Image (cartoon, rainbow, N blue to C red):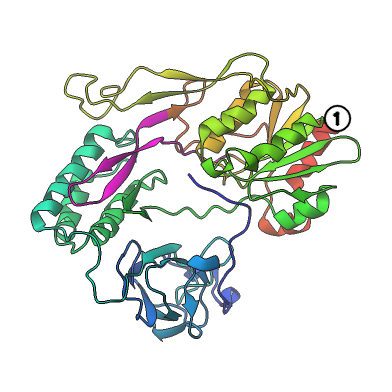
Amino acid sequence: MRSGPCRARSVFPVLAAAAALFPAAVLGEAPKVVKATPDNGDSGVDPALKEIRVEFDQDMSTTGYSVCGGGDAFPKTAGRPRWADARTIVIPVKLEPDHRYELSINCPAAMNTKSAGGESAERYPISFTTGSGKGGKAKGKKPTLESNHAAVKELRRAIDEDYSYRDLRKVDWEKLFVEHAPKLERAESPAAFARAAARLLESAKDLHVWLKVGEQTIGTYTRHVPPNCDLKTLAREVPGWRRHNDCVSTGRFEDGIGYILIATWSPASRGAALEPAFEALDGGAPRGLVIDVRPNSGGDELLARDFAGCFVSKPAVYSRNDRRDASVGGAGRPGGSRGFTAPLDRIVEPKKGRPAYRGKVAVLIGAHCMSSCESFILMMKASGQGRLFGERTYGSSGNPKPFELPNGVTVFLPSWRDYLPDGTLLEGKGIEPDVPVKADAAAFAAKDPVLKAALEWLRG
C-alpha cells in the first residue's frame, strides 16, 4: 500500500463544524457518499462542467465541510463549496480539457464534512479525467449486459478460488452477489461497474482489495487510523532535524543517538529517495539508533528488506506465507487448508555494499503501520537488535494480484496469507510492541512519549 508523511496535502478552505455541540451519545453511523458527479473513475468528463456534486446517504451538517487535495491535480475552484440541500454539497470548478483531477471528501488532516448529528463522513476520494471538449465521444467501450454478466461471474470465481482471505472475512458472498448483481449488470460504464463492485467488496473490510479502470484506482475500504506521531513535534524534539524528502527525515542527539524516520516504502523511494537513511547509518550512532516508521503504511517489501539487511549479521526468518492455489487440494475448494500451497519462509539477509549497524535499535511503531511496513518491523525484530516501542500495528498484508474482468475492469485481490514466524496469522492481529506506549493526539502535539520511552531505553 501507499503512504506519506504524518500530514495531508494542502486542504481546501474548511469551515469548521462545532463538534462539541454534538455529544458522543447521539452519534450514529458515519455518513457515506452515495453518488458524485463526476464520480471516482469517470473518464471523458466534459471540461465545460461547472460544478462537482456530491450526495450523501443521510442529512448532513451544512455548517462545515472538508474538501481535500492539492497541486495541479486539484480542480481550480470558482467559488466556495455550498450545500444545495441537507444531503448534497456543490463545489464550483473550472476544469481544463484532457486533464486528470483528484480530490477527497474528508482526509486524515480534516474531517469536517459531518452528519447532522456530528459524525464525520467516511473519506471518499474522487479521481476523474476530462475529455477534449471537442464533442468527441469518451474513450472506452460501453459495456454490454452480457459483458457485465460475465464480469460478475468472473469476479465471483476470483473471490472463491483466488482470494486468500475469503473465509477469514466471514462474509456471506452468496447473499452479497444476489443483492448487488442487478446493479452491476446494468452498469453503463466500466467506472460505474467498478464503483458498484467496490460497494460489494467493501464488506470484506480489506485494504488490499481494490479495482482499476484504466489508470483510475477505486478503493473498497477506508481505515481511520492516524499515525501516533506529530511531525511538528518531532522537528522540535529531534536535534538536527532534517527532512530530506517525502521518504526520509534524520537527526542526531547530542549524546550520539541517531534518528531516522522512514515515512514510506513506496517503490518511488527506490534509489535516491532512501539514500539519506543509508548515509545516516554510515555516519554511525555510538549510543544507539531510533528508527521511526509510525507514519509508514507500506509499499515495496523488497525495498524494506534492503534497508533491514543493514541490521542482520546472518540470514533470519522474519515471516512466513502460503498462497491461494486452486490446483491444491483437488477441486481447490475454499476453506481450511485446501487450496493453499505449503508455507514458505521469508528471509532477510545481510545487505552487501551497504553499511552494517550492530548497535541497539529502538523501532517506533503504531496502528498506522501495515503491509510491507509490518514486514520491515518483523525484519528488525528478527535481527535481534531491534526493540519495538509504541502501539500494536494494523495487521494487514495481502500481496494483491490483478484479475481482469471481461468488461474492462481489473480487480486486485490478496494472494497470500501472511504469518509471524511462530505461525500466528498477521491479518487482523498486527504486531505487539515490546514496550507499549499509548497516548492521545493532544499528547503528541506537545511531546512525543513514544520517542521519550525509546531514548530512555537506549540511554539505560
Q: Name the residue rendered at 32%, 70% in the picture.
A: 131
Please state which amino acid type lies under the numbered disc 1. Arg
Residue in the picture at 48% in, 70% down: 26
Q: Residue at x 57, y 73 (%)?
A: 19
Magenta segment boundaries in residue numbering: 393-417
339 in relation to 258, above or below: above
Vertical placement of residue 116 versus 231, above or below:
below
Residue 448 x/y as whole percent: 76, 49
Q: Nearer the viewer, residue 18 or 189?
A: 189
Residue 64 horizontal side relative to residue 174, left or right: right
| Residue linked to disc 1 | 287
Relative to 276, is 426 on the left or the right? Answer: left
Whether the magenta-drawn stretch holds residue 406 is answered as yes
**Image quadrant where residue 22 sits:** bottom right
Q: Who is closer to the viewer here, 444 or 249?
A: 249
Q: Position of residue 67 (x, y in %)?
A: 50, 72
Residue 202 part of the magenta segment? no
Q: Is residue 52 visible?
A: yes
